């Protein structure tokens, strides 16, 4: 049965307990859900939607396709009513929320194409997630119904936004005016991790790891302590691969190498919780070279990076998010690249498909989890041939 979300009234005491925990204990003081109630979310009329972010107010953000196939950033709230967040250009341009945003202020961040021509004809990072119309792509900040562009560094053409914390600071990456010789065409310009302030102005640039030949950086998440995670590497194609040679944590603006599994590419933190726990994916070994062969990882402060493994029969995995109870979600994939959503907690990775009350369709990836254990992501309806966004609500023991 395909249902809609009922609006939740969240008990403040539970929320405060989760935030106070700061990642220092396991989910719900060690308890685990018996099962999850699965809810498919409405779409904008197209054949594909995905939930990428869920905060503790139950706001779910991501994207949904229009009937034309164009992707638009979307917000689900108040009984699963879907809202088209629009774009920075016309309706034929694409936009999306890609990373867990997490703040409780109603601020969303993502990327959108504009109507301004791209003078360098780059694919840029946006082109790996949205069909490129040959125009500039900017990170955006959305608040109270208004989408505002987040501008690149002086001389740069493009920007890209990921997360925003409760102080209103947004992170991502942006081009500058340097023609970087480590870029692979059509990418030309160098980019660096950036912090935009509450007014949308650039307030910080985050440098590469010292001691290496890294030229670029990109930030993927920020917590309320101002800790930022992301990647350091060379320009390459401006998306993953050799742009992600190193997993990085920036403390007070200074880069720290948090380690990897020996791989020389595709090392990417995806989320940091309030306690400083970091999750993401990292290539399995140096032998992988620039080929993608990821393993989901967890990095707890003071401990070595941990390989979370994968589901039985699968060959790789990726962690997308972590909440303050140290529950981790992501996907695990077989040799044919058929992927299943997982939840990891208390040292065990489980297939989310085996836990939901409705097993009609396959949940392919879990993208985010809030402090109440609610999970959002994407599933596939093989009968309809459609990808749908979902929320899975836990039923606790």
Image: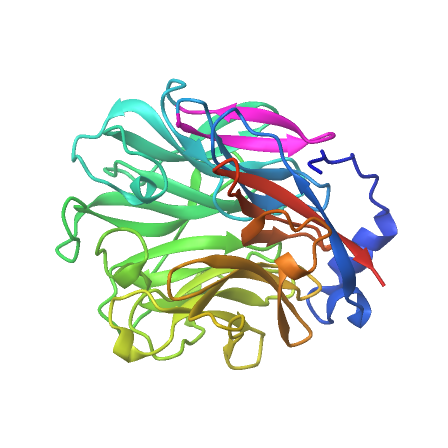
Magenta part of the chain: 69-88
Q: Position of residue 110 (x, y in %)?
A: 46, 38
Asked if one can make out residue 391 in the rendered structure from this viewpoint, the answer is yes
Question: Residue 333: where, in percent of width, then height?
Answer: 45, 63
Query: Is any atom of residue 255 visible in this view?
Result: no
- Residue at coordinates 57% horizontally, 40% vertically from top-left? 389
Give the residue at x 47% y 58%.
339
On screen, residue 191 above or below 323: above
Q: Position of residue 85 (x, y in %)?
A: 52, 26
Image coordinates for residue 377, horizontal then vertical, percent: 57, 47
Of residue 377 and residue 268, the one placed in the foreground of this image is 377
Q: Magenta includes 76?
A: yes
Q: Is residue 194 shown left or right of residue 97? A: left
Residue occupying the point 63% across, 47% down: 360
Q: Please determine whether, in this image, residue 133 is positioned above or below residue 282.
A: above
Q: In the depicted view, which residue is nearer to us: 168 or 127?
A: 127
The N terminus lies in which quarter of the figure? top right
Which quadrant is home to the C terminus? bottom right
Give left or right: position of 230 versus 182.
right
Q: Is residue 19 magenta?
A: no
By secondary structure, the bulk of the magenta-drawn segment is best described as strand
């Amino acid at each position: 049965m395909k249902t809609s979300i009922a609006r939740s009234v969240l008990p403040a005491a539970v929320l405060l307990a989760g935030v106070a925990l700061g990642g220092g204990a396991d989910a719900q003081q060690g308890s685990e859900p018996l099962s999850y109630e699965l809810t498919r979310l409405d779409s904008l009329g197209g054949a594909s939607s995905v939930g990428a972010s869920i905060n503790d107010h139950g706001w779910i953000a991501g994207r949904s396709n229009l009937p034309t196939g164009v992707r638009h950033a979307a917000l689900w709230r108040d009984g699963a009513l879907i809202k088209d967040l629009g774009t920075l250009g016309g309706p034929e341009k694409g936009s999306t929320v890609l990373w867990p945003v997490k703040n409780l202020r109603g601020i969303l961040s993502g990327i959108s194409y504009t109507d301004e021509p791209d003078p360098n004809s780059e694919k840029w990072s946006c082109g790996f997630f949205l069909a490129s119309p040959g125009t500039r792509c900017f990170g955006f900040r959305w608040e109270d119904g208004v989408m505002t562009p987040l501008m690149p560094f002086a001389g740069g053409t493009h920007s890209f936004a990921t997360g925003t914390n409760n102080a209103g600071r947004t992170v991502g990456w942006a081009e500058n005016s340097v023609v970087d010789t480590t870029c692979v065409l059509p990418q030309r310009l160098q980019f660096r991790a950036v912090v935009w302030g509450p007014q949308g102005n650039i307030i910080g640039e985050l440098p590469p790891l010292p001691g290496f030949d890294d030229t670029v950086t990109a930030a993927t998440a920020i917590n309320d302590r101002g800790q930022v995670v992301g990647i350091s590497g060379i320009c390459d194609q401006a998306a993953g691969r050799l742009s992600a040679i190193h997993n990085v944590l920036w403390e007070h603006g200074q880069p720290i190498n948090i380690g990897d599994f020996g791989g020389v590419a595709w090392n990417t933190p995806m989320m940091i919780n309030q306690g400083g726990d970091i999750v993401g994916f990292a290539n399995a070994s140096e032998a992988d070279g620039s080929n993608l062969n990821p393993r989901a990882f967890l990095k707890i402060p003071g401990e070595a990076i941990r390989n979370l493994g994968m589901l039985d029969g699968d060959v790789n995995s990726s962690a997308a998010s972590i909440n303050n109870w140290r529950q981790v979600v992501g996907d695990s994939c077989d040799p044919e690249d058929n992927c299943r959503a997982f939840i990891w907690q208390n040292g065990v990775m489980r297939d989310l498909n085996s836990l939901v009350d409705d097993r009609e369709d396959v949940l392919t990836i879990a993208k985010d989890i809030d402090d109440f254990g609610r999970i959002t992501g994407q599933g596939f309806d093989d009968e309809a041939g459609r990808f749908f966004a979902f929320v899975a609500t836990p039923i606790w023991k």
